[in-house]
Image: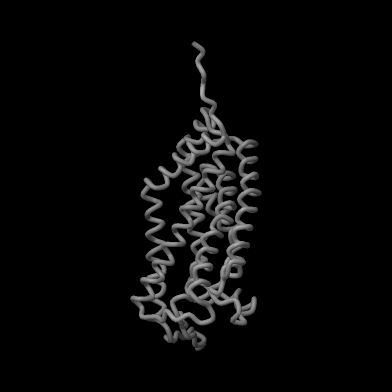
Amino acid sequence: MEKKFEKFTFGKRLDSMLNVDFRRMFTIPFFYIMVGISLVVPILILVMTTMMDGSVTVDPNGNETIMQGFDFVWQILGSVSSSGQDSSAMMSMDLVSMCNINMMYFAVAVLVCVFVSDDFRSGYSKNLFTVRANKTDYVISKTLVTFVGGAMMILAFVIGALIGGKISGLSFEMQGFNWANLLACVISKMILVSIFVAIFLVMSVIAKQRLWLSILLSLGVGMFLFNIAPMVSPLDANALHVILSLAGGTLFCVGLGAVSNLILKKTSLV
């Protein structure tokens, strides 16, 4: 009787990789630490800035600086694009413009870099590519899994903002946007994670087991796109912003995914 061997197709290889990576993601304590930090950070920001709102500090030259906190809870998620805020204001380095949800994209960099670096430091990636996995499968799996992890961090930040707003007593009033806009804003920010994940994955496969280098490269390159996030995902976002975020994320994942694949093929795995 002739024995037939089941063909290990691309779909089956990818499914196997995804199962392994999702299991790793949801069983390592580091992931839950990152999600926990994402939840706690907005609570601390809203409570502390509300307490310090209106306080005055004086430098040695006698110049006074008045601390300005958030006017309402949703401000920690972004600003309204129709508010007339110009590009120079968006580039300002005041507390409110910096301490918001957009800084979480840099936290995602740490998640991606640690998750990928562990593969190279432990020798798992070398053994994986030698035994069965294709480098394309590896890149796709890492992109999808870390995207889900990063999106969960963004969602945790939003939940933390709701809790922090309640504790600090800030207003939940919506000026210039509604619940549908707010939902589109959050969805856009979650989708934008895919753009940063694609960038961070390239930096991680370049640095491989050198975690410190992958984080430095990721943070440095990520800075160039940091100011795009608030423009693509304002508080008054709509379906168009979601579509633009999805299109940008798809292009970055496909394009930079090919770059990551090429780097893995052309460089040593150690």
Q: Position of residue 86 (x, y in %)?
A: 64, 79
Q: Is residue 69 visible?
A: no
Check the image and report above or below for 86 versus 136: below
Who is closer to the viewer here, 182 or 255? 182
Residue at the spot x=50%, y=76% of the render? 178
Q: Taking 66 as reference, is 93 above or below it?
A: above
Q: How many numbered markers are drawn?
A: 0
Q: How is the image coloured?
A: one colour
Quadrant including the C terminus: top right
Query: 79 and 97: which one is in front?
Result: 79
Residue 113 visible to an observer of this rendering: yes
In this view, the residue farthest toward the left is: 167
Residue drawn at x 58%, y 51% is: 198
The answer to whether 250 appears left or right of 48 in the picture is right
> Residue at 42% across / 83% down in the picture?
53
| Quarter of the rendering containing residue 37 | bottom left
Extreme residue in the top direction: 1
Locate residue 229, reporting x and y percent.
Answer: 58, 66
